[in-house]
Image (tube, rainbow, N blue to C red):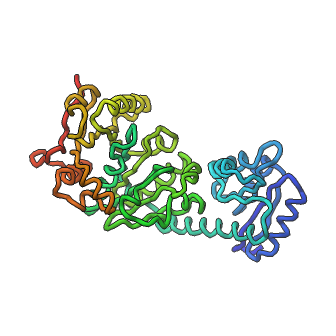
Amino acid sequence: MEPDKIRVVIVDDTAETRSNIRKLLAFADNIAVIGEAADGSEAVEVARDLKPDCILMDINMPGLDGISAAEQIYQAAPECLTIVISVQEEQEYLRRAMAAGARDYLTKPFSGDELINTINRVWQLECARRSRHEIVEKPTRSAETIAVFSAKGGVGKTTIAVNLAAALAKQNHEVILVDFDLQFGDVPLMLDLAVQHSISDWFADGCPAAVDYLLEAGPGLRILAAPEVPEEGELITAEHIAQILKELKSLADFIVIDTPQFFQETTLQALETADHILLAGTPDLANLKNIRRCLDVLAKLNLAAKVKVTANKVGAEGIRLEQFSSHLNYPVWRALPYDPRLAYQACVQGIPIVDLNPRSKLGRALEQMSKDILGIYEPKKMLPFAGTLFTRKG
């Protein structure tokens, strides 16, 4: 067998199906079938023994099913690329297969061209990924990661994330802004960006090098966009979040994550990975209750040490900031003044506040927040609404 051929194993409980797939692959000069298996358990053994480049795995088999087998193969032989095959077209099957480590998904019946093209595409993406890993043996960076989280919507969480990222980039740092609101993310909208690639494209392509899926948003600032179709976000798992954040950390000085306002698995993974959690909220009674609950949850998850409560829209109707901090019994790390007109203008124009009007009170407070993250905060030059305002009661 020629060394440059893609070595494939066919797994299906029906001998006729295995034979038909073998015949289809015979038309591809660069693919060689090196083995077969009739069930999931046998597939795991064959993967260990033959170490194929690719396994074509039927999902619906007696005993150990294809998804369970794919998961075991991913653990035992992660270099082996699994493509699952099924008559099922439901998103749930696709989600489970990808979570188990599968690289692609084919629905029966399929043509010979579809089969061969899928194998070649998955293999080419894997070869490109391996080449990049060989070139970059050791990451030269390990980005500081800041997750911006809120207990409810409408508190300006995304505004804070976008402007923090933009302000860090203005200070000559490489920054990646990640939109992990996988159903309803709007970071590109706030930066007036057309979405050419998103995290769902990265996932659909078999999770290759993430750098190819980043959008340029200006000097030093790149974006990983959320899916444009909400259903696609359901396919992204906590494992995918951990994988892509690990890779992104080697590509920038700072990662800023805009999270959804829900404690779901993907959100928890992002919060656990982060070095800092900016818990955003507005000083009003409704938000006070939510923030207290949120702080309790984060404490139970052993994440309290990362939390920095950030009060936004200070000066709008609500309780006084001193009362807000007192009722929370938790320090308010930074406070951002209320400027609805400027926030609206920035959103409509797709320009961060720190660029649109950096000399405004809100612009200066956001700039100062970025400096505090950088660790170059100078108390003598503290700007209004930018200092540590209150501390926990003893």
Instruction: Determine which quarter of the picture holds residue 103.
Output: bottom right
**In-front residue for pair 94/254:** 94
Query: Residue 210's x, y, as percent?
Result: 49, 61
Question: Is 315 positioned to the left or the right of 245 in the image?
Answer: left
Q: Position of residue 70 (x, y in %)?
A: 70, 50
Q: Residue furthest left?
A: 380
Find residue 323 and report its horizontal and vertical position in percent.
22, 28
Res 173 seen here: yes
Q: Residue furthest top?
A: 394
Name the residue at 21% across, 31% down.
391
Find the residue positioned furthest to the bottom: 29
Instruction: Classify the position of the N terminus by image quarter.
Output: bottom right
Image check: 268 left or right of 113?
left
Let me know if residue 74 appears in the view: no
* Left or right of 55, for residue 332: left
Residue positioned most to the right:
16
For the point 34% across and 59% down, which residue is it?
175
Residue 8 versus residue 309 in the image, above or below: below
Seen from the viewer's position, the closer of residues 20 and 351 is 351
Picture residue at 56% right of the left edge, 65% below the top: 130
Question: Where's residue 215, x and y in %?
Answer: 42, 65
Number of numbered discs present?
0
| Quadrant of the rendered image containing residue 6 | bottom right
The reply, left or right, for residue 274 in relation to residue 235 is left
- Image quadrant holding the C terminus, namely top left
